[in-house]
Amino acid sequence: MTELNIVDENDNIIGEDTRKNIHEKGLIHREIAVWIFNDSKEILFQKRSLTKERYPGLWSASCAGHVEIGDDYEQAALRELEEETGIKAAKKDLIFMGKLKKGDFNETDKPGNNHFKMVYACYFKGKKSDLKLEEGEATSLEFWPIDKILNLPDEEKKDFTPSLVNDEVYLNMYRKIKKFVN
């Protein structure tokens, strides 16, 4: 069973527990997200597997995951990039986008995913066919034009994890990524 660090309100490590217990108790832990973008002003989204505990079958970040014990945020981002997309990157390839403190609650009002999330962007020079899908995690990888994501009609927003198309923090990150490609 995967163990993760528990952190306090200042992101200092104060203990460890299983991923399951951390989520059930609403304990604060660490996660990463990486937004992959290309020269065509597109961002890569992955469609979550139908077996995922949260938001099955919805479009989500290019790659995301937990920071494992002994890793820092950047190491976790590089590991997840390779595991979920096949992209082998170096720390210098990660563009820091921000650090978020998020608290989610699941459908039955129980504590859920209470975490610090370090968000990065990563420029991708290859073709979509160069990417490798991580089996069991996602069912599809697709590049979406940033302008389309920023102007999604409400009926299409239901196909995405809610915060990614409704939270102004993420929408501002997409705008910032768009400016990287000029």
Image (tube, rainbow, N blue to C red):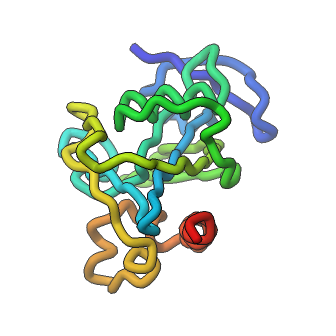
Point 37% across, 60% down: residue: 161
With respect to residue 43, does 138 lie above or below? above
Point 48% across, 44% down: residue: 112
Picture coordinates of residue 59 (x, y %)? 31, 58
| Marker count (numbered) | 0
Picture coordinates of residue 84 (x, y %)? 36, 35
Q: Is residue 162 left or right of residue 178?
A: left
Picture coordinates of residue 131 (x, y %)? 30, 40
Point 68% across, 48% down: residue: 96
Q: Quadrant of the N terminus?
A: top left
> Residue 134 lies in what quarter of the image?
top left
Q: Is residue 4 left or right of residue 2?
A: right
Q: Is residue 13 left or right of residue 140?
A: right
With respect to residue 127, does 175 lie above or below? below
Q: Nearer the viewer, residue 144 or 21?
A: 144
With respect to residue 75, does 38 lie above or below? below
With respect to residue 73, does 152 lie above or below? below
Picture coordinates of residue 17 (x, y %)? 55, 18
Q: Is residue 181 left or right of residue 55?
A: right
Q: Quadrant of the C terminus?
A: bottom right
Q: Nearer the viewer, residue 65 or 112?
A: 65
> Residue 145 lies in what quarter of the image?
bottom left
Point 33% across, 84% down: residue: 154
Q: Nearer the viewer, residue 169 or 82?
A: 82
